[in-house]
Image: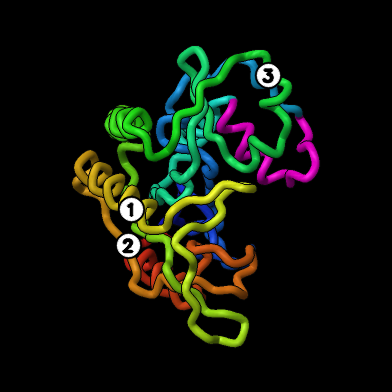
Amino acid sequence: MSQARIGIIGSCVTRDLWPLADQAPKHLSYVARTSLPSLLSPRPPGLHPAEEPPPPLKRQQHNALRADIEKTALATLVAFRPTHLIFDFIDERFDLLQAEGGLVTRSWELETSGYMAASTATFTRIPRLSSGCDRLWNDAVREMAAVIALSPLNTCQIILHASRWAHTYRDAQGALQAFPPEVEILPRETANIREQNDLLARYEARFLAAFPAAAIVRSDLGQADEAHRWGLSPFHYVDAYYEDIRGQLARLGAV
């Protein structure tokens, strides 16, 4: 059997299925910190990322940011020729920024980099829960289906990793605790867990309408873990969640 080549357009929710380097698939291409509209957008003007990551960004974080700004991620993924392409939409929580027809994701990495402060372009902010962002996303998911159909990606297995923000978490002592309704996603900015989960449900329904042959992996074990290596968050789950999803992916040959 040939070696699986795994592509991910998503977040750490999927990348963390393989927490250790020696557990990860040998062939893996990971696109993160983007949004479907930004992934498919022309490059926005006035943003000029450096070769080296500005502090405190790590190289992997900076690489994801550069790909979102420079619009290289999709071409890289096509050249990678994955056998399986996994989508998850947890990173679709950030607002978008638009200038002269180009879009970029307003991620923590972008805010931290200083690139916006150095930009000469005028950007308009598009709130994630706005009708404008909704229209952009609906157009983008249809465009993504067309891109895949007309590219070498048309031979890969499309997989939706359907996930939700957890309402509860296990604390360091193993006790069950509840998240507040609003949680921080950027410094001094919060998002409502219920609203984000409703958004994920809408996005996933639209994705499945565009990709009716997609396989779906999901788990009822999506409880957050205070001891998670990336810290406490509604989408940093207990180990059992990742084990469940890995098992489902194994049955699809995505290992």
Q: How far apart are marks 1 and 3 (CA)?
A: 36 Å
Rendering quarter of residue 121:
top right
Circle 2 packing at 10 Å, graded few (<14), some (14-19), many (20+), is: some
Task: Quickly name the residue at label 3.
Answer: 119
- Membership of 63 in magenta stretch: yes
Q: In the shown orientation, is residue 218 left or right of residue 225?
A: left
Kindly identify the amino acid type of the residue bearing the numbered disc 3.
Ser
User: Mark 2 or mark 3, which is nearer the start of the sequence?
Assistant: 3
Whether residue 236 is visible to the viewer of this picture, yes or no, is yes
* Residue 20 occupies quadrant: bottom right
For disc 3, the neighbor class at 10 Å (few under 14, some 14 to 19, many from 20) is: few
| Secondary element type, mark 1 | strand
Q: Mark 2 points at which residue?
A: 217
Q: Do the residues labelled 1 and 2 touch (CB within 8 Å)?
A: yes
Amino acid type at image mark 2: Val
Bounds of the magenta segment:
51-69
Describe residue 13's horizontal placement relative to residue 210 as left or right: right
